[in-house]
Structure formats: structure tokens, C-alpha cells
Image: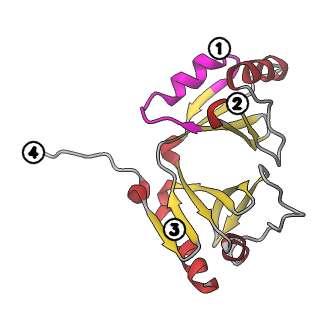
Amino acid sequence: MANLTLTARSALDGFTKDYGTLQLRKITGLAVVSIATPLDGGTVLSKAVRAAFGAGMPSPTMTTVGKNGTRLMSSAADQILVLFDHLTPDANAVVHAKIKGAGYTTDQTDNWVALEITGSNALKALERICPIDLHDSAFAVDQSARTTMEHMGVFIIRTDAQSYTLLSTSSSARSFLHAVETSITNVL
């Protein structure tokens, strides 16, 4: 049998590229952990989340931001995603310990690729491939939505007036990057 050595690599290997005033980059060091609410455990989980992260539970369309920039986002009924800076592979254990077992946690970090698009043309680039209204009056800072872009599932979060975080499945990371890059080049 052949002696093989595997080396772990993240999707898109820390991609970053400037397009004039617009920047597209893969967010590195981002952990994604889901928390599912136990049956009849919503109140207990809500209190545990506030104590652990300094933020309330997110609504279906708005994220909340807590301690150290930890972002909480609704991903499904009775389920949230916790997004936070974390470099080691123990993100699930960290979140589980912080909420003291008040919810069911699952590490989702390797399932998602996160891109950040920032700059004055970010909205123009995204509105070409995103079917939801992202203008200021319809999609405020800290708002989130689950949608599609070029037939791929995406979570989109508006993090600033000219910045968006996009989460798509890591299995289609290259295709997703290509779709976003193509849209950017079409608005320049």
C-alpha cells in the first residue's frame, strides 16, 4: 500500500483580491457552530446565550453581535449559528461549555466558506446575483437572509454600510467564488 500524507487545507486557501475600491476576501479563522433548541428549552437557552455571548437570540432576519464580535444568526426554526474568530479545531467544545449544555451544539466550520465583499460597488455586484432587495431601506446593517446566488444556497449578512458576509457550502466554494467574481467584474 502506498504511503500517503494528507494535508488539511481550507476552502479557497485565504483568497483575497482587490478590484479598485472593492475588496473580496475569504474570511479566515472563522468558526461556525450551530445550536439547536431542546424541546421546551427556549427560555433556558436564551438565558444561556445571553450570559455566554452578551447578546440576545437573533430574530429570523436580524443577527445579534456580542462579546468579541461574536455574531449570532438564525439558520432555521429553533436553530442558530454562532460565528466567531477561532483558530483551533475545538469550536464546538468552546460553545457547548459557554452555554453550559443548554442546547445541542454541532461544529459547522468546515461545512461553510465565508466571503466578505466590501466597498462602494459591493451592492451593485451583489444585486446582479442575489434575488433579494439589499438596498438600505430593505436590508439594514446586521440583517441576514437565506437565499440563493447562481443556484447555490447562501446566507448573506450585512455587516456594515458597504460590507457583506456571504456563507455558502464549502463543497461548492470555487463555483461560488467564481460567481461573485464574475458579478464584480461585470459592474466595474
Q: In x, y percent, where is residue 77?
A: 79, 39
- Label 1 sits on a secondary structure element that is loop
Which of the labelled discs sits on residue 36, or is there none?
A: 2
Residue positioned 83% across, 68% down in the render: 135
Q: Which of 151 and 166 is in front in this view?
A: 166
Residue positioned 53% across, 76% down in the render: 19
The reply to whether dot 1 and dot 4 touch (C-beta < 8 Å) is: no
Compared across the picture, whether 185 is left or right of 52 comes to: left
Tell me the residue that label 3 is attached to: 177
Upstream in sequence: badge 1 or badge 2? 2
Tell me the residue that label 4 is attached to: 1
- Give the mark toward the camera: 2 or 4: 2
- Label 3 sits on a secondary structure element that is helix
Q: What residue type is labelled 4?
A: Met
Query: The N terminus is located in which quarter?
Result: top left
Find the distance from the CA under tag 1 to the CA under tag 4: 45 Å
Upstream in sequence: badge 2 or badge 3? 2
- Give the mark toward the camera: 3 or 4: 3
Examine the structure image and report whether residue 85 is included in the region drawn in magenta. yes
Find the distance from the CA under tag 1 to the CA under tag 3: 37 Å
The reply to whether dot 2 and dot 4 touch (C-beta < 8 Å) is: no
Residue positioned 49% across, 35% down in the render: 86
Q: What residue type is labelled 2?
A: Ala
Name above or below for residue 178 compared with residue 158.
below
Mark 4: give few (<14), some (14-19) or many (20+) Cα within 10 Å: few
Q: In this picture, which residue range is highlighted in magenta? A: 84-104
Name above or below for residue 130 compared with residue 110.
below
Q: In x, y percent, where is residue 101?
A: 65, 15
